[in-house]
Image: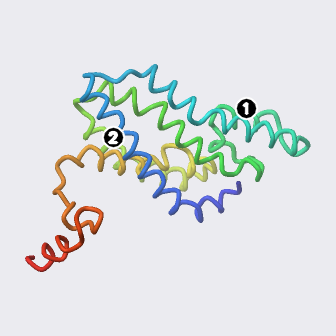
Amino acid sequence: MHPTSFISLAPPAGGFFVISGYLMTSILWRERERTGTTNLREFYIRRAYRIFPAAFVFLAVAIVVFWPQIRWYQIAAGFLYLANYDVSCPWVFGHLWSLGIEEQFYFLWPGILKRWYRHRVAIVVGVLLVTPVWTAAMLYFKVRWGVWAFPALADTLAIGCLLALFAPRLPNLKPLLGPHHGDGRDRRRTLLRQ
């Protein structure tokens, strides 16, 4: 993937990362509320079973088909979920940068959340504050891989994490959500009363 193509992919991927941060934090938080802790071993096993088989098949087929165009370090970056740091990544591995971001998040966030649970909001806010500084520094110093590295996109994941952390405090919007939360007349009555 060429560095300029990252810019055009950032908005849709950003939304995906917000959703991912929200879902992952919600899963981890529910487990902590249910059991009092987070079982990191079980978490990582579930992630591996969910993602690795499809990624492995894709990489195996891509390596066989595009063998002359691929270097050993690009293959290693793909298998280690580090393709987002490889500026020479061939086009066939181009989408692996987002999988790399996801896996790096999955690797870091559960352990951070488990270890520093009491400081979870401060950590997420800190990520939101540091990410623009990282990105500006990478652009200023012309570090090509820096704008699509994990730290450059951590803010989008952090927004999702923050939403998950504050979701229980948000007002109940079910009456306004539509027919699947009543027969439809309830929604109209609620809207008319406001």
Count every numbered label the image shows and give the total: 2
Q: Does 91 appear above or below 104? A: below
Label 1 crowd (10 A; few <14 / some 14-19 / many >=20)? few
* Left or right of residue 63, residue 8 in this image: left
Residue farthest toward the bottom in the current orientation of the protein: 192
Q: Position of residue 157 (x, y in %)?
A: 42, 47
Label 2 crowd (10 A; few <14 / some 14-19 / many >=20)? some
Q: Amino acid at mark 1?
A: Ala
Question: Which residue, given by chain and number where applicable, does mark 2 sit on?
Answer: 26
**Which residue is painted at 52% across and 24% down in the image?**
45
**Which residue is painted at 59% across and 43% down in the image?**
99
- Residues at discs 2 and 1 in contact (Cβ within 8 Å): no
Which element is circle 2 on? helix
Residue farthest toward the right in the current orientation of the protein: 68
Q: Does 116 appear above or below 147? A: above
Question: Which residue, given by chain and number where applicable, does mark 1 sit on?
Answer: 76
Q: Quarter of the image holding residue 109?
A: top left
Q: Quarter of the image holding residue 73?
A: top right
Q: Which circle marks residue 130 in the picture?
A: none
Q: Position of residue 77 (x, y in %)?
A: 69, 35
Q: Position of residue 40 (x, y in %)?
A: 42, 22
Q: Does 109 appear above or below 20? A: above
Q: Position of residue 166 (x, y in %)?
A: 23, 47
Q: Amino acid at mark 2?
A: Ser
Marks 2 and 1, the one that precedes in the sequence: 2
Which element is circle 1 on? helix
